[in-house]
Every structure is written in C-alpha cells, then in structure tokens.
Amino acid sequence: MSDFTDDIEKKANSSAEVVTEEVIHGDEDAGHMHRSLKGRQVSMIAIAGTIGTGLFLSSGKALTNGGPVGALLGYLIVGGLVGLMMYALGEMMVWDPSAGGFIEFSTRYIDGAQGFAMGWQYWLGAVISTPTEITAAAIVIEFWDLNDKHKAIYITVMLLGIILVNLAGVKYFGEFEFVFASIKIVTVIGLVIAMLVIDLGGGPTHERIGFRYWREEPFNSDFFEVVPAAKARFLGFWAVLTQAAFSYGGMEGLAMICLEAANPRVSIRTAVRAIFYRIVLLYVTSILLIGMCLKRSDPNLLQANAESTGTAAESPFVIIIENAKIKVLPHILNAIILTSAFSAGNEFLYGSSRSLFMLAQQGQAPRFLAKVNKNGVPIWSLAVCSLFSLLAFLACGATGANEAFNWLSNITTLASLITWIGIGFAHIRWVKGMKAQGLSRDELPFSSFLMPWGSYVVVISFGIILFFSGFEPFMSKPFDYQSFISNYVNIPFYAILFLGWKIAKRTKWVSYEDMDCSTHYVENSVVYSKY
C-alpha cells in the first residue's frame, strides 16, 4: 500500500512541475486555479478533512438514542450509503476533473436549474457551517476558561486564522490540512486502542467490560417513553440515521478540490478509495467501542447530553476515560477537539468559496465572484464567505441572538442529504446518457462494480431518511414547531431555487442524446477564470 501511495505521490509531484497552461473554461488573460494539492494532501483531506465535533462530541447522543447496537447499525448503514455516493461522485470527477464538481455535473446531466439549486444549497450549508465550527471551537476552550466574555476574543482569533490560511493559497491550505488531518487520525487510532484496553480490563480499575452493555441494553427501549418497546427501539435507531448523516456531512466537499489537485485523475481516484478507511476505521470502529465501553443510560452520559456544553465534558470518549480513572487524557482530547473544529471550519470556508466560484463560472452567480488572484484564490468569493463567517459573533450576543445562530446552524443539518441525493441522481442520468450515445463504461479511468445500481440505492435510501428526519418534533408535548421548521426548511428553500431559476431562465431538461458526456480535461492543464 505504501509503495502504491509513493508512486502516486511521485506522479502528482512530477505533473505539478509541468506547466502546460492549457485553457479550460476560461480566458488566458484571466487568473487561474493552481493545481498545487499533492496526492498525499488530497487523500488525507478525504480521510479526515471535515471530522469535527460530529464524531468527538455528538456520537454520545447516538449511543443514548439507539443503544450500542442501534448506534452501530445506524452508522454502518449511513456509512455504506455515503460510500456508494462517493463512488458515484468519484466516477464523474475522475472522468472530468476540469468540471465544477457536482454543481456543473447537475447542470450538464439534469437541468440548469438543478445545477443552480444544488450549488446555492450546498454553498449555504458550507458557509453557515464555517461559523458553526468556529463557535464550537470557542466553546471547547471553555473547558479551561469559564469566562464567557472571552468567547468573542477566541472567535476573532480563529476567524482571522482560517481567513489567512485560505488567502495564502491552496498550496499552504493543503499542507495545513494535511497536518491537522494527521493529528485527527492519530488521535482516533489512539482512542480506539485506549478503549479496547479499557474494555479488556487494562485500565486503572482493571474492570473487564466485554460486551456487557450489548447484552443489557442493546437498543433504547424507552425512547420518548414510546410503547410498545419494539416501537421505541426502532424509533431510537431511526434517530441515529439522521445524526450519522450529520457526522458524515462534508465528504462531498472532495468535489471542490478537483480544480486544484495535481494529477487529479490519480489523486482523486485514490482519495475516493480512501473514504472506505474513514468510514470503517474512524467512524464505525469508534462507535463500536464506545458502545462496548459506555452504558447507554450512564448518568454521566445522560447529564452531558442534557447540558450539551460543547466541550470535552460532552464527549463519550472523555466519559469513558474518566470512568476508568485515567487522568490528564481529557485535557489532551479537548485540545484535539479544538484543532478538529478549527480545521473543519477552515475546510468549510474553502469549500464555500470554491462553490461560489464554480457558480460564477457557470453564470449562476455574479461574475466578479469568479475573479482569481495570483495565488489562485477566488478572492471575491472568499471575501463574501468570510463576511458570512462573522455570524459566529451571534453566539456571543443576548439570548435572542444566540438562539438565532443556533437556528441558522440547524437549517443546514440536512443540506448534505439533499446534496447526496442530487449527486446520485446526476450519476444515474450520466450513465444513461453515456449508454444512449454509445459510450462504454470500459472507457472510464475509474469505475466501480457497484455502479450504477448503487446510485439508485443512494437516491431512494437518502430520500426516505430525509422525508422522515423530522419525526421527533411530533413526539414532543407540546409540538416543537421550531425543530420541525429547522428540520425541513432546506426542502422548500431548494424548491424555490430550482423553480425560480427554471422560470427565470426557461431551462430545459437535458435529453440523453444532447447530454455533454465528454470529458473536457486536458493533462497538465489549469482552469482559468471566465471573467
């Protein structure tokens, strides 16, 4: 495996040194994107890029809702579906890495209105996720500093940090993310080993746990006090599906780097395959061991979920460590959670600025947003997204401002689900278009035996999860209308974008015969701004 990776790295580096400035989608006199992301950087970003508070903190709620078995099944199922989605996206990206990711694929293979809606819907989710992660990082610091008045200072410092990293150019962004992704991976591997040792009785208490909690409470039999118990167990498991989708959110952001990856066909193909390790090692194995080491109804876990501090005190990993009477580690883990949240915010700022650039390239956003400076940074797109990052300061305001920020954060929870469905649908139509035009899948530089049927599974399964994601507000007494709105507001927002663009531009559904299924990628080429 290491020899294969080294070979890819050599190819990526050698291709980066060749400056064959072919013009793709633009004007020679305009600025262009820099293909400076190396293979190792792309792979590491794919494996651990957007890992943040979803795994380190929110996994405890998944255990409480679904029990150890329900939580594991939920993460396995959603992880499998996300893997299928990434293989579908990978086939299209490797075929044409010069395209604007799933935004342009949606326009080419479905409808111009679909590309517009997919792009702006993804942008909203990414641009709101940036201040969400930065605020989460500031809250994490409260593990050591309880003075709430200092939160604005921490937010300011971290916002300046991620803006400067993005301004420096993709070369430095890639190196920064490589280092932080490596820290995350080492941390998760270390936690997995630590939990395995604790479970087998190697901790200070020498208590051997085994699969005790799996036998006692495999599922949540009193979810919302629903009867009969079988119904409660199912609903608890179903609640995990939405939560797992939130944890896996951001993987589709790999499409945003296709314009800036050196030797993209090799690096992106390797990165898509690396997603398997992220799902199995970083998520599923972690959830498995959390359920083995921590009881679903552990008082410390229930209290942590109720208080929802946002610090390491909420993390199931920390609760397991403290129950085992291990000292110091909680502070180390809190520091790791801090760097993870900061790194995730950095990636979401990058992804939101690139998606805005791609929209501008297609004429679906103001032209000036496609302007690229000498560092290969879409400078005006980054400026606009950075302004939205200032929403993080709402978390420092009065109760009303804080609630407004939390509501904004919640409306993006299901943005990834809508994006994943759109990717699967675009892939289905692309495959049919290739077939109608006599193009064989044997011509693809990267393909999976799971496709195209895997895309049908993705569209149907995520569609069902999306439709039933907001069932919990109906179980609250009284009806929790705010949660209901935040769960489903993405759908009408997406519909307004789609219909508005379709009516305004009178776009037409792309027929299979007229579909642009060709690849526009030229080896060693760069992408110039159109404007």
Image (spheres, helix red, strand yellow):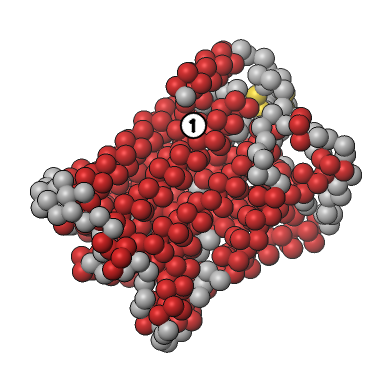
**Tally of numbered discs:** 1
Q: Please name the residue shown 73% across and 62% down the image.
A: 500
The image shows residue 121, relative to residue 196, as above or below, that is: below
Depicted 434 relative to depicted 499: above or below: above
Q: Look at 16% across and 46% down and name the residue there.
A: 202
**The one of 506 and 303 positioned closer to us in this rendering:** 303
- Is the C terminus in the top left, top right, bottom left or bottom right quadrant? top right
Within the image, what quadrant is residue 176 found in?
Answer: top left
Rendered position, 454 above or below 463 = above
Comparing 483 with 385, the one in front is: 483
User: Around disc 1, counting alpha carbons within 10 Å, would you say few (fewer than 14), some (14 to 19), or many (20 or more)?
Assistant: many
| In the image: residue 61, left or right of residue 276 | left
Instruction: From the top left corner, tell me how far across and down residue 194 is, in percent.
Output: 23, 44
* Residue 24 at least partly seen: yes
Say which residue label 1 marks. Answer: 43
The residue depicted at 41 percent of the width and 64 percent of the height is: 70
What secondary structure is marked by label 1?
helix
Residue 339 screen position, x and y as percent: 31, 41
Residue at the far bottom: name it.
Answer: 478
Indicate the position of residue 40 as horizontal and vertical percent values. Answer: 47, 26
Q: Amino acid at mark 1?
A: Ser
> Of 308 and 62, which appears nearest the observer?
62
x 14%, y 54%: residue: 207
Q: Is residue 189 left or right of residue 259?
A: left
Q: Quadrant of residue 362?
A: top right
Point out residue 129 in the picture as x, y percentages from the top left corner.
Answer: 46, 53
Residue 381 appears in view: no
Describe residue 354's horizontal placement relative to residue 173 as left or right.
Answer: right
